[in-house]
Image (cartoon, rainbow, N blue to C red):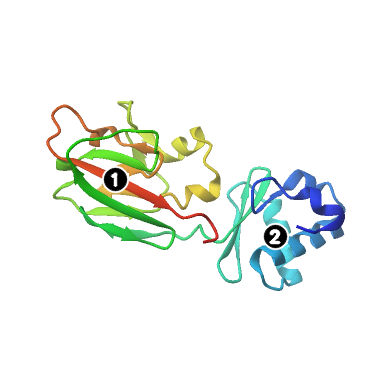
Amino acid sequence: CRFGPCESLVEAVPGGVDLPALHAQPLFLQEYFLQEFTREFAREEVEFGTVKMLLNVSHAPTGSSCRLGQGTVVWKDRDTLLFTTRGGEPFRHPARLGMRHEFGAFAFATSVVPKAEFDADPNVEYADGERLMGAELLLRSWEDGDWFVPLGMSERKKLSDLFIDLKVPLYDKHTIPILLSGDAIVWVCGKRLDARFKVTAETRTIVKLHYTPRPLGT
């Protein structure tokens, strides 16, 4: 980015603005920087009213957001103002066993396999197929109050607490698919399986779950 004296304000994270550094500048430089940064990110002209809206979000509590033009979403996450081209919109996608589904932000596939081949890939998981059969499968966005029983635990845990523990950025929290079987959460895709659906020595049908996220901006 070429923002003259404000160039150092750009956070190392792509699409992020370091707010303490931004707020340390005179107001006119804050406005100039946000206008130029937004113009470069969104590839469109930026009105002064938009700049004022961004400044308001930058001083608002964590979790505040606004939408700009053609799909750009801006989030306040602690000391960073994050610009993304996806996120914030709730989604609900029915899924079927044995099929691959392509969605705008991710792909998801399930297949019956003879055995579980566990490795370090967080986007592949294995579940007890008999626990999945007979109920509607759904991929949806996180909802306030969601809970599950994380693998390795016996007590329920709120997803909001899991995201905090894993230091999941706020904008990611709203884009991570949650796989449900009926009303029960099976998998926080790419993060943690629910212990109630784990493969055990008694499991007769093993289902491979494969989540493929697409990078922001694609």
Of residues 123 and 52, which is closer to you in this image?
A: 123
Residue type, mark 1 in image: Leu
Place of residue 123 in the rendered image (x, y in percent of width and height, measured from the top left)? 38, 43
Residue nearest the observer in this picture, 122 or 119: 119
Q: Nearer the viewer, residue 162 or 107?
A: 107
Which residue: 83% across, 53% down? 6
Residue assigned mark 1: 209
| Label 1: which secondary element | strand
**Is residue 22 something that shows in the picture?**
no
Q: Which mark sits nearer the N-terminus, 2 or 1?
A: 2
Q: Residues within 10 Å of mark 2 (few under 14, many from 20)?
A: many
Taking the image as shown, residue 187 lies to the left or right of residue 36, namely left
Q: Residues within 10 Å of mark 1 (few under 14, many from 20)?
A: many
Front-lying residue, 77 or 112:
112
Provide residue 134's location: percent of width, then percent of height: 13, 50
Left or right, residue 15 beside residue 99: right
Point out the image quarter for the N terminus: bottom right
Q: Secondary structure at mark 2?
A: helix
Q: Amino acid at mark 2?
A: Leu
What's the residue at 73%, 72% (across, down)? 47
**Relative to 128, does residue 136 appear above or below in the rendering?**
below
Q: Position of residue 202 (x, y in %)?
A: 13, 29
Relative to 183, say whether 99 is above or below: below
Question: Disc 2 and disc 1: Cα gap in Å?
Answer: 39 Å
Residue at 29% across / 52% down in the picture? 109
Say which quarter of the image contains residue 34.
bottom right
Give the residue at mark 2. 54
